[in-house]
Amino acid sequence: MITKEYLINLLKENGVFLKGDFTLSSGKKSDYYINMKKAITDPEILSTIAKLITKSISEDNIDKVAGPALGAVPIATAVSLESEIPLLMIRKEKKGYGTSKLIEGELNEGDDVIVVEDVTTTGGSLLKAIKAIQDNGGSVKRAFVVVDRQEGAIEAFDSEGVKLEPLITVDEFF
Ligand SMILES: O=P(O)(O)OC[C@H]1O[C@H](OP(=O)(O)OP(=O)(O)O)[C@H](O)[C@@H]1O
Ligand SMILES: O=C(O)c1cc(=O)[nH]c(=O)[nH]1
């Protein structure tokens, strides 16, 4: 059976935990880094993540699964394949040409959406994607992250009225 413990072991076996001096997306400094790009480019890890999220939403009536670029797009794609829920891809910025869209895929007014993320530190990137979905008529029902670093994202989500649901928190690695 696919469990959270199975995912933790896969991440450990694949050496996604790095020690060193790192600057994070938010500008924060850290003495460790979770190499989620390595994790989500591994088929077994990606498929395990997709199965865990799909199982968790099996009772929900969800119209779209969304992931912000870059790290969450493969995760959202894998969940879309597993659950057969159509995909939305959220760009970091609007394209200045072509269709000039921030959200790729078909988001309809009133759609119930789940969002996924690879890792959260402040939660700022995923909150920005959620706002884009809401501004375009979507209703964000659930928010999943593979690994939460326990540095304030859950609290930041709470204050925006969205519950952040980590598959794993960083303390579960140690
Ligand atoms: O919770 P936060 O403080 O926002 O940090 C986490 C974000 O940082 C990373 O993305 P990054 O900005 O490195 O972009 P990428 O996915 O394009 O590499 C990660 O994929 C999350 O989106
Ligand atoms: O906050 C980030 O940018 C971040 C932290 C981390 O541990 N891993 C990652 O891919 N991004």
Image: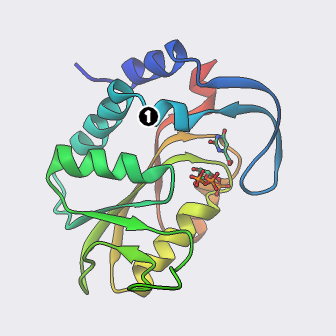
Q: Can residue 58 be seen here?
A: no
State the residue at coordinates (54%, 38%).
37
Left or right: residue 77 versus residue 90 is left
Q: Nearer the viewer, residue 96 or 80?
A: 96
Residue 84 % position (x, y): 14, 53
State the residue at coordinates (32%, 23%).
3
Question: In the image, is the residue at mark 1 within 8 Å of ligand 1 by its beta carbon?
Answer: no
Q: Can residue 159 be seen here?
A: yes
State the residue at coordinates (50%, 12%).
13
Q: Quadrant of residue 78?
A: top left
**Element at badge 1?**
loop
Total of numbered circles in the picture? 1
Rendered view: 69 above or below 8: below
Q: Nearer the viewer, residue 101 or 124?
A: 101
Residue 161 % position (x, y): 50, 70
Left or right: residue 112 versus residue 84 is right
Residue 166 % position (x, y): 48, 43
Q: Amino acid at mark 1?
A: Thr
* Placement of the C terminus among the 4 image quadrants: top right
Residue under label 1: 41
Residue 146 % position (x, y): 47, 40
Left or right: residue 78 versus residue 75 is left
State the residue at coordinates (22%, 18%).
1
Dot 1 alpha-carbon crowd within 10 angstroms: few under 14, some 14 to 19, many 20 or more? few
